[in-house]
Amino acid sequence: MNNHRLDRVKATRVVGVSLLVFLSGCATTPHVGYVSKSPKQASKNIFIQVINFEDSRPVPERGKLGSRYNQYGMNAGDVLEPASMVEGLQNAFITELQNAGYDIVTDGRDLVLQGSVLSVVCNQNNSSQAAAIKMRIVLLDKGQEVLNNVYQGNSKVRFTFDITCSDAFNDAIRNLVTSFAKDLDEYVKT
């Protein structure tokens, strides 16, 4: 083999490896536009005021939600947090409560719901997305605390062409709200 051909092969390899490293290091950001798959139920005539959710995660846990892994198990980039993550979670929570038949109001009715985001994680590989959301939900009835629990929504979905973890996030939020709604339904029956 002549030297000119060896130099071309080496250059091709360097460009190929550089391109692979560049493309595998891309970060993605979940889309927080929540898409509900829950059927809308008839109104239960129970009115809830939702107070702005707060972000109670430690500061080092904010910004990066998880990692993407390629088919070889190597880290292929970060899953980054969108700027409006907590607001997006609150809006998704409200949507699911409305679909469950609860009426969301802006004035101080009897029931007031406060939320606190404790952790949000999303990881991806070539075949699936996994998300976990943990929140503390406090329900006040006429100013008295009646529920104060930590709820977690988990989801693992087969990988689609959505590289933003949105499918897994939507399922995790829905699972979290469904868990809370069971406790809320029990409380309002009493």
Image: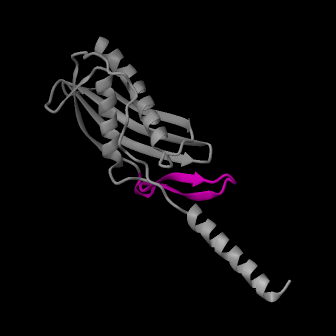
Q: Residue visible at 43% across and 49% down?
A: 30
Q: Nearer the viewer, residue 50 or 58?
A: 50
Residue 185 image-quadrant placement: top left
Residue 166: percent from left, percent from top? 45, 43
Q: Residue visible at 34% across and 46% down?
A: 86
Specify the quadrant that holds the C terminus.
top left
Specify the quadrant that holds the N terminus.
bottom right
Q: Nearer the viewer, residue 13 or 86?
A: 13
Q: Using residue 35 as the reference point, say whether residue 44 is left or right of it.
A: left
Asked whether residue 55 appears in the rendered view, the answer is no
Find the magenta span and give its range.
Answer: 58-79
Does residue 171 sit above or below 60 in this rendering?
above
Residue farthest to the top, as pictured? 190
Q: Residue visible at 40% across and 56% down?
A: 59
Q: Using residue 159 as the reference point, say whether residue 149 is left or right of it.
A: left
Residue farthest to the bottom, as pictured? 3
Does residue 103 sit above or below 65 in this rendering?
above
Residue 113: percent from left, percent from top? 27, 31
Does residue 163 sit above or below 95 in this rendering?
below
Q: Is residue 115 magenta?
A: no
Residue 152: percent from left, percent from top? 46, 34
Q: Residue visible at 56% across and 53% down?
A: 68
Q: Using residue 119 as the reference point, say whether residue 2 is left or right of it.
A: right
Does residue 69 sit above or below 167 in this rendering?
below
Q: Using residue 167 as the reference point, say whether residue 85 is left or right of it.
A: left
Q: Nearer the viewer, residue 34 or 65?
A: 34
Residue 157 image-quadrant placement: top right
Asked which colour scheme the image uses, the reply is: one colour
Residue 145: percent from left, percent from top? 27, 27
Asked whether residue 87 appears in the rendered view, the answer is yes
